[in-house]
Image (cartoon, grey):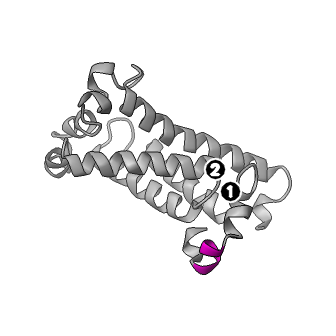
Amino acid sequence: MPAATAGPARYAWAAARIAIGWVFLWAFLDKLFGWGFATPTAKAWINGGSPTTGFLKGTADHTFGGLFNTLAGQPWVDWLFMTGLAGIGTALILGVGMRIAATTGGLLLLMMWAAELPLTTNPFMDEHIVYAIVLAGLTLTGAGTTLGLGTQWAATPLVRRFPILK
């Protein structure tokens, strides 16, 4: 275990892992069922709504708005986005597949950051970048092994054969 995750620090990293995992998983659940937090019931994915339309259509006036606007509402983009939210959130909460979850989560966050450029509250920094940095820290410190199934997951024959799945 890396030194950064020795002692009480490992619990802080585990709490960060679970919290960010919940952010991803909650986004998936709210967009799927439309529980009225960020997504109204009428716009829920299970009611025929598109989980990507609201955010991506709102980027039309931004730097990469043309690109992201064309992706909005595409069924393959909706499926990829929702699968990513569910998979990243679940992996982080369980502490398994941390390398893939951190990499794909970081890429998703960087794309969401790029969709909002230029930022209105800061020249370049926002929560998407902060979360991406924390995701890298979670993987580098082995945060899935504390209050998670990372140790058991790493011992499986599949992960021993393909360490990228750690």
Q: Residue at x 65, y 54 (%)?
A: 95
The vertical placement of 29 against 141, above or below, is above
Mark 1, other Cα within 10 Å: few <14 / some 14–19 / many ≥20: many
Mark 2, other Cα within 10 Å: few <14 / some 14–19 / many ≥20: many
The residue stretch that appears in magenta? 157-161
Residue closest to the eye, 116 or 37: 37
In the picture, the quarter occupied by the N terminus is bottom right
Mark identifier at residue 94: 2
Q: Residue 55: x percent and y percent?
A: 27, 36
Q: Secondary structure at mark 2?
A: helix
The vertical placement of 106 against 165, above or below, is above
Residue closest to the eye, 143 or 66: 143
The vertical placement of 48 against 147, above or below, is above
* Residue 138 included in the magenta stretch of the image: no
Residue closest to the eye, 161 or 93: 161
Amino acid type, residue under disc 1 in the picture: Gly
Can residue 124 be seen by looking at this rendering? no
108 sits left or right of 141 in the view: left
Which is more foreground, mark 1 or mark 2?
Answer: 2
Name of the residue lying farthest toward the bottom: 161
Q: Secondary structure at mark 1?
A: helix
Q: Residue at x 38, y 35 (%)?
A: 121
Q: Residue at x 71, y 70 (%)?
A: 155
Mark identifier at residue 91: none
Q: Residue 19: x percent and y percent?
A: 61, 40
Residues marked 1 and 2 touching at CB (< 8 Å): yes
In the picture, the quarter occupied by the C terminus is bottom right
Residue closest to the eye, 44 or 27: 44
Amino acid type, residue under disc 2 in the picture: Leu
- Identify the image quadrant of residue 28: top left
The residue pinned by badge 1 equals 144
